[in-house]
């Protein structure tokens, strides 16, 4: 590939609580306030933080840059960039950066806001995806057209499997209200499964609208095509509750977009967790809290608070 063909980096913005296990200090902050939290962090700034829920994914993504740099010029554009967004102050955030350096993560850009919202800085950094433990920040990011998901803080999850599974980056997506718009989901909720099936059959050749993660999927796809398909280090999957005949519209939509998904699982309502474990997902994105609960038993899962499932009931 010529230098002019090198894709722009995939940019991921992540909160410190998604990257590291900060629940002990966060609980102290909730109980005793900012002064106690600051004193706690300063007194432990040389103690390395344990990996958090998104740490394995970040480490795998950044490893793509190491592979790309082998035998290459030092000024090569990185394939992935990770940006840290933290509501710590720069003073209390020193422990976070010390931990980043200890774990060998090439994270060079960061924002520390001293308690102010971090989401306004996502777009200036050009991020394609925002991962955070703060549900309100995720909602605000989605409102401003950024793919975002809430990760329930937890220790790092290592996907099952061995060999290529351990090395590949495996990312799974729900369809409606994540990759696609939620119009079909609205039909299902208002008219039931029969109305949904009829709606999808009648519109099988009409592409679905893009959902909040379409742009991220597109950026991920551009990164994938930089590699030979046989040795691509990134593998993607659609894991949807849809079944035949509603599958056709999905397939034709992806064809229209010119985007490759390596695997597509049409589950017809079966629980998603065991299938995500079989796929070996490093992370899974879904708008349904019910599906996220199933997935979290097996893999790291990000809730996308978008679409009709996440709208409050009408007072009418």
Image (cartoon, grey):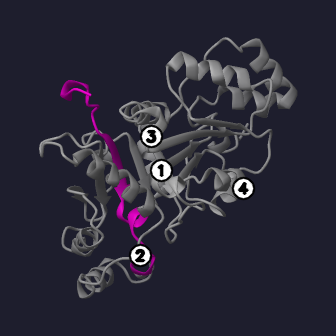
Answer yes or no: is residue 282 visible. no
- Identified at 63% across, 44% down, the residue is 310
Quadrant of the rendered structure where residue 255 is?
A: top right
With respect to residue 28, does 259 lie above or below? above
Q: 5 or 201, which lies in front?
A: 5
User: Are circles 1 and 3 on residues that touch, CB within 8 Å?
Assistant: no
Picture coordinates of residue 290, whole percent (x, y): 71, 53
The residue singled out by tag 2 in the image is: 26
Q: Which residues are magenta?
A: 1-25
**Nearer to us: label 3 or label 2:** 3
Nearest to N terminus: mark 4 or mark 1: 1
Q: CA distance from mark 3 to mark 4?
A: 26 Å
Q: CA distance from mark 3 to mark 2?
A: 41 Å
Q: Decide if residue 234 is on the left or right side of residue 204.
A: left
The residue singled out by tag 4 in the image is: 274
**Nearer to us: label 2 or label 4:** 4
Nearest to N terminus: mark 3 or mark 4: 3
SS for dot 2: helix
Q: Residues within 10 Å of mark 1 (few under 14, many from 20)?
A: some
Nearest to N terminus: mark 1 or mark 3: 1
């Amino acid at each position: 590939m010529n230098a002019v063909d090198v894709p722009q980096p995939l940019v991921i913005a992540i909160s410190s609580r998604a990257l590291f296990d900060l629940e002990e200090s966060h609980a102290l902050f909730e109980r005793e306030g900012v002064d106690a939290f600051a004193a706690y962090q300063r007194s432990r700034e040389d103690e390395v933080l344990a990996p958090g829920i998104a740490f394995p994914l970040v480490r795998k993504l950044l490893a793509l840059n190491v592979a790309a740099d082998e035998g290459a010029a030092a000024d090569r554009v990185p394939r992935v960039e990770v940006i840290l967004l933290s509501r710590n102050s720069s003073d209390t955030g020193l422990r976070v950066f010390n931990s980043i350096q200890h774990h060998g993560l090439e994270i060079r850009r960061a924002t520390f806001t001293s308690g102010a919202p971090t989401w306004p800085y996502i777009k200036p950094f050009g991020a394609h995806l925002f991962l955070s433990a703060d549900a309100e920040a995720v909602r605000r990011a989605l409102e401003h057209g950024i793919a975002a998901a809430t990760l329930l803080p937890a220790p790092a999850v290592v996907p099952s499997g061995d060999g290529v599974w351990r090395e590949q980056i495996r990312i799974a997506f729900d369809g409606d209200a994540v990759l696609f718009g939620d119009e079909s989901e609205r039909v299902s909720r208002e008219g039931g499964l029969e109305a949904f099936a009829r709606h999808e059959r009648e519109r099988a050749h009409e592409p679905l609208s893009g959902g909040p993660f379409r742009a991220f999927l597109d950026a991920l796809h551009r990164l994938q095509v930089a590699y030979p398909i046989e040795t691509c280090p990134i593998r993607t999957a659609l894991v949807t509750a849809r079944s035949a005949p509603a599958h056709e519209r999905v397939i034709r939509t992806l064809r229209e977009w010119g985007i490759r998904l390596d695997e597509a699982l049409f589950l017809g309502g079966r629980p998603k967790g065991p299938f995500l474990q079989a796929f070996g997902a490093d992370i899974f994105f879904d708008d349904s809290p019910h599906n996220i609960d199933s997935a979290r038993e097996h893999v790291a899962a990000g809730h996308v608070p978008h679409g009709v499932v996440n709208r409050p009931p009408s007072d009418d």
